[in-house]
Amino acid sequence: MRPHHNDTTPRHHIVIGGGIVGLASALTLRLEGHEVTLLERDTPGHGASLGNAGTFATYAITPLAQPALLRQTPYLLTSRDSPFHLRWRHLPRLLPWLLRFVAEARPARVRHNIEHLSYLMARADSDWQRLLVAADADSLVTRRGCLYTYQTQAAWERAIQEHDTLAWNGIRYRVLNEHQTADLEPALAGKVKGSIWYPDASHVADPLTLCERLRQAFEALGGTLQAPSDVERVSAHDAGVVVTTRAGQTVCDHAVITAGIATRELAGSLGDRMPLEAERGYHLEYAMDTPLLQRPCCIAEHGCYMTPMAGRLRVAGTVELGRASDPANPARYRYLERAMGKLFPELGAPTAYWMGCRPSLPDTLPIIGRSAHTRRVHYGVGHGHLGLTLAATTGALIEADLAGQAPPWLDALAIARFQRGLKGQS
Protein backbone atom coordinates (compact mmCIF):
# COMPACT_ATOMS: atom_id res chain seq x y z
CA MET A 1 0.00 0.00 0.00
CA ARG A 2 1.60 3.23 -1.13
CA PRO A 3 1.44 6.31 1.13
CA HIS A 4 -0.68 9.28 0.15
CA HIS A 5 1.44 12.43 -0.19
CA ASN A 6 -1.23 15.12 -0.68
CA ASP A 7 -1.34 17.01 2.64
CA THR A 8 -4.71 18.59 1.74
CA THR A 9 -6.41 15.23 1.32
CA PRO A 10 -8.66 14.13 4.23
CA ARG A 11 -7.15 11.44 6.41
CA HIS A 12 -10.14 9.72 8.03
CA HIS A 13 -13.04 8.66 5.84
CA ILE A 14 -16.35 7.03 6.67
CA VAL A 15 -17.96 5.06 3.85
CA ILE A 16 -21.69 4.65 4.42
CA GLY A 17 -23.14 1.56 2.77
CA GLY A 18 -21.50 -1.86 2.41
CA GLY A 19 -22.84 -3.02 -0.93
CA ILE A 20 -20.52 -3.70 -3.84
CA VAL A 21 -19.98 0.03 -4.51
CA GLY A 22 -19.25 0.82 -0.86
CA LEU A 23 -16.92 -2.15 -0.46
CA ALA A 24 -15.00 -1.26 -3.61
CA SER A 25 -14.76 2.39 -2.55
CA ALA A 26 -13.62 1.54 0.97
CA LEU A 27 -10.96 -0.87 -0.29
CA THR A 28 -9.71 1.64 -2.87
CA LEU A 29 -9.30 4.35 -0.25
CA ARG A 30 -7.53 1.93 2.08
CA LEU A 31 -5.15 0.87 -0.70
CA GLU A 32 -4.21 4.55 -1.04
CA GLY A 33 -3.28 4.76 2.63
CA HIS A 34 -6.37 6.46 4.07
CA GLU A 35 -7.90 5.62 7.41
CA VAL A 36 -11.33 4.20 6.51
CA THR A 37 -14.37 3.10 8.50
CA LEU A 38 -17.13 1.29 6.65
CA LEU A 39 -20.65 1.49 8.09
CA GLU A 40 -23.30 -0.99 6.95
CA ARG A 41 -26.78 -1.32 8.44
CA ASP A 42 -27.00 -5.04 7.66
CA THR A 43 -24.40 -7.54 6.44
CA PRO A 44 -22.00 -6.27 3.75
CA GLY A 45 -23.02 -7.43 0.29
CA HIS A 46 -26.49 -8.59 1.31
CA GLY A 47 -28.59 -5.91 -0.38
CA ALA A 48 -29.02 -5.43 -4.12
CA SER A 49 -25.40 -6.58 -4.54
CA LEU A 50 -26.43 -10.09 -3.52
CA GLY A 51 -28.94 -10.62 -6.31
CA ASN A 52 -27.48 -9.06 -9.45
CA ALA A 53 -26.89 -10.87 -12.73
CA GLY A 54 -23.18 -11.25 -11.91
CA THR A 55 -22.05 -9.69 -15.20
CA PHE A 56 -19.32 -7.10 -15.75
CA ALA A 57 -21.25 -5.47 -18.60
CA THR A 58 -18.56 -3.23 -20.05
CA TYR A 59 -20.48 -3.03 -23.35
CA ALA A 60 -23.52 -1.35 -21.72
CA ILE A 61 -23.05 2.22 -22.93
CA THR A 62 -26.62 2.65 -24.20
CA PRO A 63 -28.85 4.48 -21.68
CA LEU A 64 -32.29 3.09 -20.92
CA ALA A 65 -34.01 6.30 -22.05
CA GLN A 66 -34.16 6.02 -25.84
CA PRO A 67 -36.69 7.15 -28.47
CA ALA A 68 -37.21 3.50 -29.47
CA LEU A 69 -38.09 2.57 -25.90
CA LEU A 70 -40.65 5.36 -25.65
CA ARG A 71 -42.37 4.06 -28.79
CA GLN A 72 -42.85 0.73 -26.99
CA THR A 73 -44.47 2.38 -23.95
CA PRO A 74 -48.07 1.17 -24.56
CA TYR A 75 -46.89 -2.44 -24.79
CA LEU A 76 -44.51 -2.11 -21.84
CA LEU A 77 -47.25 -0.72 -19.60
CA THR A 78 -50.03 -3.14 -20.53
CA SER A 79 -48.64 -6.55 -21.47
CA ARG A 80 -48.16 -9.29 -18.89
CA ASP A 81 -45.17 -10.37 -20.99
CA SER A 82 -43.48 -7.00 -20.63
CA PRO A 83 -40.12 -6.78 -18.80
CA PHE A 84 -41.35 -3.50 -17.28
CA HIS A 85 -43.97 -3.08 -14.56
CA LEU A 86 -45.24 0.06 -12.88
CA ARG A 87 -47.06 -0.06 -9.56
CA TRP A 88 -49.78 2.39 -10.52
CA ARG A 89 -50.69 3.48 -7.00
CA HIS A 90 -47.24 5.08 -6.81
CA LEU A 91 -47.64 7.02 -10.08
CA PRO A 92 -48.13 10.48 -8.47
CA ARG A 93 -44.85 10.12 -6.57
CA LEU A 94 -43.01 8.57 -9.55
CA LEU A 95 -44.28 11.05 -12.14
CA PRO A 96 -41.38 13.57 -11.76
CA TRP A 97 -38.87 10.73 -12.25
CA LEU A 98 -40.75 9.42 -15.28
CA LEU A 99 -40.93 12.88 -16.87
CA ARG A 100 -37.17 13.29 -16.41
CA PHE A 101 -36.69 9.83 -17.94
CA VAL A 102 -38.70 10.88 -21.00
CA ALA A 103 -36.65 14.08 -21.29
CA GLU A 104 -33.45 12.02 -21.33
CA ALA A 105 -34.63 10.31 -24.55
CA ARG A 106 -33.98 13.49 -26.56
CA PRO A 107 -31.19 12.85 -29.11
CA ALA A 108 -28.77 15.37 -27.58
CA ARG A 109 -29.21 13.86 -24.12
CA VAL A 110 -28.83 10.32 -25.45
CA ARG A 111 -25.52 11.30 -27.09
CA HIS A 112 -24.33 12.95 -23.87
CA ASN A 113 -25.23 9.93 -21.75
CA ILE A 114 -23.60 7.48 -24.17
CA GLU A 115 -20.43 9.57 -24.13
CA HIS A 116 -20.17 9.50 -20.35
CA LEU A 117 -21.09 5.84 -20.01
CA SER A 118 -18.30 5.19 -22.53
CA TYR A 119 -15.81 7.09 -20.35
CA LEU A 120 -16.77 4.92 -17.38
CA MET A 121 -16.70 1.62 -19.26
CA ALA A 122 -13.34 2.33 -20.86
CA ARG A 123 -11.64 2.01 -17.48
CA ALA A 124 -13.92 -0.46 -15.68
CA ASP A 125 -11.82 -3.56 -16.37
CA SER A 126 -8.52 -2.03 -15.24
CA ASP A 127 -10.09 -0.53 -12.11
CA TRP A 128 -11.58 -3.90 -11.21
CA GLN A 129 -8.36 -5.78 -11.91
CA ARG A 130 -6.56 -3.85 -9.20
CA LEU A 131 -9.19 -4.77 -6.62
CA LEU A 132 -9.47 -8.39 -7.76
CA VAL A 133 -5.74 -8.83 -7.21
CA ALA A 134 -5.84 -7.07 -3.84
CA ALA A 135 -8.78 -9.23 -2.71
CA ASP A 136 -7.41 -12.50 -4.14
CA ALA A 137 -10.66 -12.74 -6.10
CA ASP A 138 -9.53 -13.00 -9.72
CA SER A 139 -10.30 -16.73 -9.72
CA LEU A 140 -13.99 -15.88 -9.19
CA VAL A 141 -14.18 -14.18 -12.60
CA THR A 142 -14.74 -16.01 -15.89
CA ARG A 143 -13.88 -14.16 -19.09
CA ARG A 144 -15.96 -15.67 -21.87
CA GLY A 145 -17.99 -12.66 -22.89
CA CYS A 146 -21.75 -12.25 -22.87
CA LEU A 147 -24.41 -13.19 -25.43
CA TYR A 148 -27.55 -11.24 -26.24
CA THR A 149 -29.90 -13.75 -27.86
CA TYR A 150 -32.96 -13.14 -30.03
CA GLN A 151 -35.83 -15.57 -30.45
CA THR A 152 -37.30 -13.93 -33.53
CA GLN A 153 -35.63 -13.01 -36.81
CA ALA A 154 -37.13 -9.51 -36.73
CA ALA A 155 -35.73 -8.75 -33.25
CA TRP A 156 -32.29 -10.01 -34.22
CA GLU A 157 -32.13 -7.96 -37.41
CA ARG A 158 -33.38 -4.86 -35.60
CA ALA A 159 -30.68 -5.29 -32.93
CA ILE A 160 -27.95 -5.54 -35.58
CA GLN A 161 -29.05 -2.24 -37.07
CA GLU A 162 -28.99 -0.55 -33.68
CA HIS A 163 -25.42 -1.60 -32.86
CA ASP A 164 -23.60 0.99 -34.97
CA THR A 165 -23.44 3.24 -31.90
CA LEU A 166 -21.44 0.64 -29.99
CA ALA A 167 -18.89 0.27 -32.77
CA TRP A 168 -18.47 4.04 -33.00
CA ASN A 169 -17.63 4.09 -29.28
CA GLY A 170 -15.09 1.30 -29.40
CA ILE A 171 -17.23 -1.56 -28.06
CA ARG A 172 -16.24 -4.89 -29.61
CA TYR A 173 -18.98 -7.30 -30.63
CA ARG A 174 -19.71 -10.06 -33.13
CA VAL A 175 -22.99 -10.87 -34.84
CA LEU A 176 -23.70 -14.62 -34.75
CA ASN A 177 -26.36 -16.54 -36.64
CA GLU A 178 -28.25 -19.39 -35.00
CA HIS A 179 -25.60 -21.99 -35.93
CA GLN A 180 -22.70 -19.87 -34.69
CA THR A 181 -24.64 -19.17 -31.50
CA ALA A 182 -25.14 -22.92 -30.98
CA ASP A 183 -21.41 -23.49 -31.50
CA LEU A 184 -20.74 -21.08 -28.62
CA GLU A 185 -23.65 -22.26 -26.44
CA PRO A 186 -24.89 -25.75 -27.45
CA ALA A 187 -27.86 -25.51 -25.05
CA LEU A 188 -29.31 -22.75 -27.28
CA ALA A 189 -29.32 -24.87 -30.45
CA GLY A 190 -32.65 -24.46 -32.25
CA LYS A 191 -33.94 -22.02 -29.61
CA VAL A 192 -32.79 -18.63 -30.97
CA LYS A 193 -32.49 -17.03 -34.41
CA GLY A 194 -29.21 -15.31 -33.67
CA SER A 195 -27.19 -13.43 -31.09
CA ILE A 196 -24.70 -10.66 -30.49
CA TRP A 197 -21.56 -11.64 -28.61
CA TYR A 198 -19.63 -9.15 -26.48
CA PRO A 199 -16.26 -10.91 -26.06
CA ASP A 200 -14.82 -8.45 -23.51
CA ALA A 201 -17.55 -9.00 -20.91
CA SER A 202 -17.03 -11.33 -17.96
CA HIS A 203 -18.98 -12.72 -15.03
CA VAL A 204 -18.49 -13.71 -11.42
CA ALA A 205 -19.15 -17.16 -9.95
CA ASP A 206 -20.94 -15.69 -6.95
CA PRO A 207 -21.56 -11.98 -6.27
CA LEU A 208 -21.77 -12.49 -2.50
CA THR A 209 -18.43 -14.29 -2.39
CA LEU A 210 -16.89 -11.38 -4.30
CA CYS A 211 -18.28 -8.97 -1.71
CA GLU A 212 -16.88 -11.11 1.09
CA ARG A 213 -13.42 -11.15 -0.51
CA LEU A 214 -13.46 -7.35 -0.79
CA ARG A 215 -14.49 -7.05 2.86
CA GLN A 216 -11.77 -9.46 3.98
CA ALA A 217 -9.11 -7.57 2.03
CA PHE A 218 -10.33 -4.24 3.44
CA GLU A 219 -10.11 -5.49 7.02
CA ALA A 220 -6.79 -7.27 6.43
CA LEU A 221 -5.35 -3.93 5.30
CA GLY A 222 -6.47 -2.25 8.51
CA GLY A 223 -9.89 -0.94 7.49
CA THR A 224 -12.60 -0.85 10.16
CA LEU A 225 -16.04 -2.39 9.57
CA GLN A 226 -18.97 -1.46 11.80
CA ALA A 227 -22.03 -3.58 11.11
CA PRO A 228 -24.84 -3.47 11.85
CA SER A 229 -24.70 0.31 11.92
CA ASP A 230 -27.82 2.18 10.84
CA VAL A 231 -26.96 5.73 9.77
CA GLU A 232 -29.74 8.24 10.42
CA ARG A 233 -28.17 11.55 9.43
CA VAL A 234 -25.06 13.15 7.97
CA SER A 235 -24.07 16.77 8.62
CA ALA A 236 -20.98 18.69 7.52
CA HIS A 237 -19.17 21.45 9.40
CA ASP A 238 -15.86 23.27 9.12
CA ALA A 239 -14.33 20.83 11.58
CA GLY A 240 -15.52 17.72 9.74
CA VAL A 241 -18.47 15.46 9.02
CA VAL A 242 -20.77 14.20 11.76
CA VAL A 243 -22.33 10.83 11.05
CA THR A 244 -25.24 10.03 13.37
CA THR A 245 -26.25 6.42 13.96
CA ARG A 246 -28.61 4.85 16.47
CA ALA A 247 -25.55 4.16 18.63
CA GLY A 248 -24.31 7.76 18.65
CA GLN A 249 -22.20 10.15 16.61
CA THR A 250 -18.86 9.79 14.83
CA VAL A 251 -16.78 12.63 13.41
CA CYS A 252 -14.54 12.18 10.37
CA ASP A 253 -12.73 14.36 7.84
CA HIS A 254 -14.74 13.12 4.88
CA ALA A 255 -17.67 10.80 4.11
CA VAL A 256 -18.56 8.73 1.06
CA ILE A 257 -22.26 7.85 0.80
CA THR A 258 -22.87 4.65 -1.16
CA ALA A 259 -26.03 3.55 0.61
CA GLY A 260 -28.17 2.63 -2.39
CA ILE A 261 -31.75 3.86 -2.26
CA ALA A 262 -31.20 5.07 1.34
CA THR A 263 -28.76 7.66 -0.05
CA ARG A 264 -31.69 9.87 -1.06
CA GLU A 265 -32.71 10.46 2.55
CA LEU A 266 -29.13 10.91 3.78
CA ALA A 267 -28.46 13.40 0.99
CA GLY A 268 -31.55 15.31 2.06
CA SER A 269 -30.02 15.83 5.50
CA LEU A 270 -27.20 17.69 3.72
CA GLY A 271 -29.59 19.75 1.61
CA ASP A 272 -28.97 17.73 -1.58
CA ARG A 273 -31.85 16.47 -3.72
CA MET A 274 -31.57 13.60 -6.17
CA PRO A 275 -34.25 11.87 -8.29
CA LEU A 276 -33.29 8.43 -7.01
CA GLU A 277 -35.90 5.68 -7.26
CA ALA A 278 -36.03 2.00 -6.41
CA GLU A 279 -35.90 0.00 -9.63
CA ARG A 280 -36.95 -3.33 -8.22
CA GLY A 281 -35.24 -6.36 -9.75
CA TYR A 282 -36.02 -10.06 -9.38
CA HIS A 283 -34.17 -13.30 -9.84
CA LEU A 284 -34.80 -17.02 -9.89
CA GLU A 285 -32.22 -19.76 -9.47
CA TYR A 286 -32.12 -23.33 -10.72
CA ALA A 287 -29.79 -25.71 -8.90
CA MET A 288 -27.52 -27.75 -11.19
CA ASP A 289 -24.22 -29.57 -10.87
CA THR A 290 -23.25 -29.19 -14.54
CA PRO A 291 -23.50 -25.68 -16.03
CA LEU A 292 -26.19 -25.31 -18.67
CA LEU A 293 -24.42 -22.28 -20.16
CA GLN A 294 -20.80 -21.14 -20.34
CA ARG A 295 -21.39 -17.39 -20.11
CA PRO A 296 -24.17 -14.90 -19.33
CA CYS A 297 -26.88 -15.03 -21.98
CA CYS A 298 -29.53 -12.35 -22.17
CA ILE A 299 -32.98 -13.26 -23.49
CA ALA A 300 -33.32 -9.89 -25.17
CA GLU A 301 -37.07 -9.99 -25.78
CA HIS A 302 -37.69 -10.69 -22.10
CA GLY A 303 -35.06 -8.37 -20.63
CA CYS A 304 -33.46 -10.98 -18.39
CA TYR A 305 -30.05 -12.60 -18.00
CA MET A 306 -29.21 -16.25 -17.51
CA THR A 307 -25.87 -16.44 -15.71
CA PRO A 308 -24.01 -19.64 -14.77
CA MET A 309 -22.93 -19.41 -11.15
CA ALA A 310 -21.47 -21.80 -8.61
CA GLY A 311 -23.90 -24.72 -8.44
CA ARG A 312 -26.80 -22.96 -10.10
CA LEU A 313 -28.15 -20.94 -12.99
CA ARG A 314 -29.37 -17.47 -12.03
CA VAL A 315 -32.10 -15.80 -14.09
CA ALA A 316 -32.19 -12.11 -13.23
CA GLY A 317 -33.88 -9.07 -14.64
CA THR A 318 -37.09 -7.13 -15.23
CA VAL A 319 -37.83 -3.59 -14.10
CA GLU A 320 -40.50 -2.70 -11.57
CA LEU A 321 -40.96 0.85 -10.34
CA GLY A 322 -42.49 1.15 -6.88
CA ARG A 323 -41.53 1.68 -3.27
CA ALA A 324 -38.50 -0.09 -1.90
CA SER A 325 -40.60 -1.24 1.06
CA ASP A 326 -43.30 -2.92 -1.05
CA PRO A 327 -43.42 -6.72 -0.80
CA ALA A 328 -42.21 -8.81 -3.72
CA ASN A 329 -44.62 -9.06 -6.62
CA PRO A 330 -45.39 -12.75 -7.41
CA ALA A 331 -46.33 -11.79 -10.98
CA ARG A 332 -42.71 -10.79 -11.64
CA TYR A 333 -41.49 -14.25 -10.60
CA ARG A 334 -44.11 -15.84 -12.85
CA TYR A 335 -42.92 -13.65 -15.72
CA LEU A 336 -39.38 -15.00 -15.38
CA GLU A 337 -40.65 -18.57 -14.97
CA ARG A 338 -42.67 -18.30 -18.20
CA ALA A 339 -39.62 -17.04 -20.10
CA MET A 340 -37.51 -19.94 -18.83
CA GLY A 341 -40.30 -22.47 -19.32
CA LYS A 342 -40.47 -21.62 -23.02
CA LEU A 343 -36.70 -21.81 -23.48
CA PHE A 344 -35.76 -24.68 -21.16
CA PRO A 345 -38.91 -26.56 -20.05
CA GLU A 346 -36.74 -29.40 -18.74
CA LEU A 347 -35.50 -27.25 -15.86
CA GLY A 348 -38.73 -27.54 -13.92
CA ALA A 349 -39.40 -25.28 -10.94
CA PRO A 350 -36.85 -22.78 -9.58
CA THR A 351 -35.08 -23.56 -6.32
CA ALA A 352 -34.69 -19.95 -5.11
CA TYR A 353 -36.44 -16.59 -5.44
CA TRP A 354 -35.13 -13.10 -4.67
CA MET A 355 -36.12 -9.43 -5.00
CA GLY A 356 -33.98 -6.33 -4.43
CA CYS A 357 -33.90 -2.63 -5.22
CA ARG A 358 -31.50 -1.07 -7.70
CA PRO A 359 -30.96 2.65 -6.98
CA SER A 360 -31.69 4.24 -10.36
CA LEU A 361 -31.54 7.69 -11.93
CA PRO A 362 -33.44 8.80 -15.04
CA ASP A 363 -30.35 9.36 -17.22
CA THR A 364 -28.75 5.91 -16.51
CA LEU A 365 -25.61 7.69 -15.27
CA PRO A 366 -24.57 7.29 -11.63
CA ILE A 367 -23.90 10.19 -9.31
CA ILE A 368 -20.16 10.18 -8.64
CA GLY A 369 -18.80 13.31 -7.04
CA ARG A 370 -19.07 15.83 -4.25
CA SER A 371 -22.17 17.10 -2.52
CA ALA A 372 -23.49 20.39 -3.90
CA HIS A 373 -23.25 21.82 -0.36
CA THR A 374 -19.96 20.57 1.03
CA ARG A 375 -16.61 19.33 -0.27
CA ARG A 376 -16.42 16.94 2.66
CA VAL A 377 -18.96 14.47 1.24
CA HIS A 378 -18.88 12.41 -1.94
CA TYR A 379 -21.67 10.31 -3.42
CA GLY A 380 -21.39 7.05 -5.33
CA VAL A 381 -24.96 6.04 -6.11
CA GLY A 382 -27.58 5.51 -8.79
CA HIS A 383 -25.82 2.83 -10.83
CA GLY A 384 -29.05 1.01 -11.70
CA HIS A 385 -28.14 -2.16 -13.60
CA LEU A 386 -24.43 -1.28 -13.59
CA GLY A 387 -23.50 -1.41 -9.90
CA LEU A 388 -21.25 -4.45 -10.20
CA THR A 389 -19.69 -3.25 -13.45
CA LEU A 390 -18.86 0.25 -12.20
CA ALA A 391 -18.18 -0.34 -8.50
CA ALA A 392 -14.38 -0.29 -8.76
CA THR A 393 -14.42 2.71 -11.10
CA THR A 394 -16.65 4.63 -8.70
CA GLY A 395 -14.16 4.15 -5.87
CA ALA A 396 -11.22 5.02 -8.11
CA LEU A 397 -12.87 8.24 -9.33
CA ILE A 398 -13.77 9.36 -5.81
CA GLU A 399 -10.19 8.78 -4.68
CA ALA A 400 -8.85 10.63 -7.73
CA ASP A 401 -11.14 13.56 -7.01
CA LEU A 402 -9.88 13.72 -3.43
CA ALA A 403 -6.31 13.79 -4.76
CA GLY A 404 -7.12 16.54 -7.28
CA GLN A 405 -6.61 14.14 -10.20
CA ALA A 406 -10.15 13.56 -11.44
CA PRO A 407 -10.77 13.58 -15.22
CA PRO A 408 -12.60 16.71 -16.43
CA TRP A 409 -15.66 14.73 -17.54
CA LEU A 410 -16.38 13.69 -13.94
CA ASP A 411 -18.12 17.03 -13.33
CA ALA A 412 -20.99 15.84 -15.54
CA LEU A 413 -21.69 12.99 -13.08
CA ALA A 414 -22.01 15.24 -10.02
CA ILE A 415 -25.28 15.72 -8.15
CA ALA A 416 -25.37 19.34 -9.36
CA ARG A 417 -26.90 18.13 -12.65
CA PHE A 418 -30.13 17.40 -10.78
CA GLN A 419 -30.34 20.39 -8.44
CA ARG A 420 -32.49 22.52 -10.72
CA GLY A 421 -36.16 21.68 -10.52
CA LEU A 422 -35.83 19.41 -7.50
CA LYS A 423 -36.34 21.98 -4.76
CA GLY A 424 -38.79 20.62 -2.23
CA GLN A 425 -38.92 17.09 -3.71
CA SER A 426 -37.83 14.06 -1.76
Image: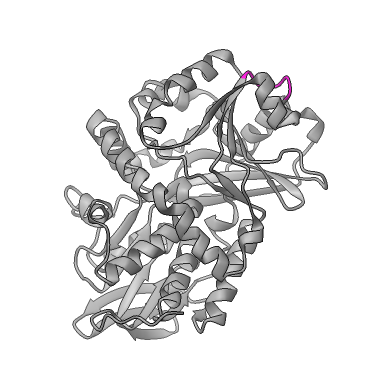
Residue 187 placement (x, y as % from top left): 75, 30
Membership of 60 in magenta stretch: no
On the rendered structure, is 141 left or right of 370? Answer: right
On the rendered structure, is 369 left or right of 192? Answer: left
Figure check: 192 above or below 354? above
Residue lying at 80% horizontally and 35% vertically, measured from the top left: 348
Would residue 286 be seen by someone viewing this image from the given angle?
yes
Membership of 190 in magenta stretch: yes
Viewer-nearest residue: 171 or 76:
171
Q: Name which quarter of the figure residue 174 lies in.
A: top right
Number of numbered callouts drawn: 0
Residue 335 placement (x, y as % from top left): 62, 32
Residue lying at 61% horizontally and 61% vertically, measured from the top left: 138
Would residue 44 be seen by someone viewing this image from the given angle?
no
Figure check: 221 above or below 77? below
What's the magenta bit mostly, secondary-structure-wise?
loop
What residue range appears in magenta?
A: 189-193
Q: Quadrant of the C terminus?
A: bottom left
Figure check: 403 above or below 98? below
Residue 66 placement (x, y as % from top left): 35, 29
Task: Residue lying at the far top in this picture: please name it.
Answer: 154
On the rendered structure, is 297 left or right of 358? Answer: right
Viewer-nearest residue: 11 or 143:
143
Residue 402 placement (x, y as % from top left): 28, 71
Residue lying at 51% horizontally and 16% vertically, measured from the top left: 157
Residue lying at 20% horizontally and 55% vertically, measured from the top left: 416
